[in-house]
Image (cartoon, rainbow, N blue to C red):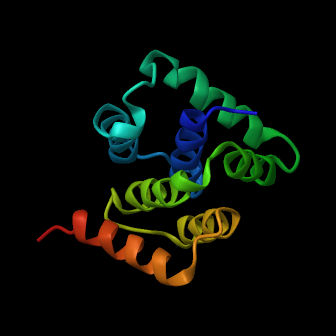
């Protein structure tokens, strides 16, 4: 079992790594989220490298992606499901493009966290609005 903090970090890492790239802008966004959101107020950010490394190791295992998503769902209390999905959407939107691999990962996370389609659409639209550039 992982902590709720680790589950939120895993969620962001899964989305960022889903297209086999982790652009600097997405990594910076993960850092900004961890520094700025109240849900991370009691998180020891010095553990971030170990948490991301553990997630990467898990993804290298057979069925690692399915295991990671299941661990996320098991670790998060219901009240953080929409938060996790919102963080995933923010990471996907951070670089201004959402490749099909990231869309598929968002779908997997949405289903694992039982986010209804209407709520998901609202969260996705909010992320799109926050990261829109002229």
Quadrant in the rendering for residue 125: bottom left
> Where is residue 99 shown, x and y percent of the image?
49, 69
Quadrant of the rendering where the C terminus is positioned: bottom left
Left or right of 64, for residue 111: left
> Where is residue 48 shown, x and y percent of the image?
50, 25
Work out whether residue 97 or residue 88 is closer to the camera in this orientation and state it: 88
Q: Residue at x 45, y 15 (%)?
A: 46
Residue lying farthest left?
A: 134
Work out whether residue 107 or residue 84 is closer to the camera in this orientation and state it: 84
> Where is residue 92 shown, x and y percent of the image?
43, 60
Q: Residue at x 40, y 70 (%)?
A: 123
Against 54, residue 23 (above or below) is: below
Work out whether residue 117 or residue 89 is closer to the camera in this orientation and state it: 117
Work out whether residue 117 or residue 12 is closer to the camera in this orientation and state it: 117
Quadrant of the rendering where the N terminus is positioned: top right
Left or right of 34, for residue 77: right
> Where is residue 12 shown, x and y percent of the image?
51, 47
């Amino acid at each position: 079992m992982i902590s709720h903090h680790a589950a939120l970090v895993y969620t962001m890492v899964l989305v960022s790594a889903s297209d086999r790239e982790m652009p600097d802008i997405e990594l910076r966004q993960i850092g900004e989220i961890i520094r700025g959101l109240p849900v991370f107020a009691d998180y020891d950010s010095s553990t971030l490298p170990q948490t991301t490394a553990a997630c990467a190791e898990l993804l290298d295992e057979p069925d690692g992606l399915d295991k990671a998503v299941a661990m996320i769902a098991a670790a998060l209390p219901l009240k953080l499901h929409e938060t996790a999905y919102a963080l995933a959407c923010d990471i996907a939107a951070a670089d201004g493009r959402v490749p099909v691999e990231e869309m598929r990962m968002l779908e997997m996370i949405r289903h694992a966290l039982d986010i209804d389609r209407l709520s998901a659409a609202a969260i996705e639209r909010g992320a799109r609005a926050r990261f829109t550039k002229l």
